[in-house]
Amino acid sequence: MRAPTAAPLLEVDNLRTHFTTPGGLVKSVDGVSFTVGHQETVCIVGESGSGKSITARSIMGLVRRPGRVVGGRMNFRLRDGSTVDLAAIPPDSATYRAIRGREIGMIFQEPMSALSPVHTIGSQIEEGIRLHLGFGARAARERAVDALEKVGFPGARQRLNTYPFQLSGGLRQRVCIAMALACEPSLLIADEPTTALDVTTQANILELLLRLQGELGMAIVFITHDLGVVAEIADRVVVMYLGQVMEAGPASGILGHPRHPYTRGLLRCVADIEGDGLLRAIPGIVPHPLARPPGCPFSTRCEEMMPGLCDTTAPELLAINGESRVRCHLWSSGQPHVTEGAVHG
Ligand code: SF4
């Protein structure tokens, strides 16, 4: 992790990604805004169904039909200093394809979904290098070996002709990281890249990503449901629920003084913040996006819900203390409202 410079690398503003389904319009991402600084790590957190993965796919231009980015801007600064609005480029255009892989890399939760089972790992890494950097076969092979060695893949040169199915989950993920970083992008999007791995491998992969971030000077957008991971790597955090940002700000503030009841709920799942030795699950489940509650999206599960207000009126996302933002009626004046039995600090 490094201190970000002033001009952001990526500015996502009011992003909306919707899916037209037989049951109705699903607003998977519904007005999401955040920025990513150069060399910064921004973690997007939330339960399954929060819209965090669709946000990541929207940036990459990889939303599958019937989904579509229908509004907002995603201003991304290219290596040459110019800025491009990713929301305004057709996802299958040559321009977007040139940005994917060269300027923005992505790794996924399940490495096999990103790897072809019928091609060797060497040929898959070399393909991107030839495409994006214009290298010839021999130079691409050397760069692939270099990329595999950078991610700690043992015996890289001798194992270029290995197929993905011959590797463990941890080694497959290292191949995916090598593929994503072979062209040294300035932004890496990591969508739950350690979730499918055992705890030891998970720790090794996180350590590897942080080391490579320092070596390559890249920013990372890390998608996760695990606040333990967030505590280890994040500079800033964006908390999402039902397609909207509930809270955002510097990691120290979000983890040390969470303001939104949903953020506090996520933290109680992994840490004993009540001081009674217990971890607590958030009651209930994320509503189906077609059954979005009126008013605050979290109102059906919130222990501090104020009837007549939270279940009728949607809270705005408000700026608090400069860099932080929170979407909750408890903070609607910029200061915590203290309700019976609840103190917010
Ligand atoms: Fe809970 Fe109301 Fe805040 Fe929503 S607006 S998080 S229901 S207190």
Image (cartoon, rainbow, N blue to C red):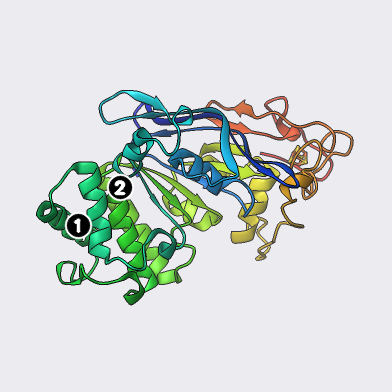
Split into quadrants, the picture shows ligand 1 in the one at top right
Label 1 SS = helix
Disc number lying in front (1 or 2):
1
Is residue 218 visible to us here?
Answer: yes
Could you classify mark 2 by the number of other residues whose Cα lies within 10 Å: few (under 14), some (14-19), or many (20 or more)? many
Q: Residue at x 45, y 37 (%)?
A: 91
Q: In the displayed structure, would residue 144 be above or below residue 60?
A: below
- Marker count (numbered): 2
Residue 3 is situated, as x and y percent measured from the top left of the image, at 35, 36
Residue underneath mark 1: 144
- Considering the image in quadrants, where does the N terminus appear? top left
Q: Which residue is label 2 attached to?
A: 213
Residue 316, given in percent of the width and then of the height, sits at 70, 28
Q: Secondary structure at mark 2?
A: helix
Quarter of the image that includes the C terminus: top right
Q: Is residue 164 above or below residue 143?
A: below
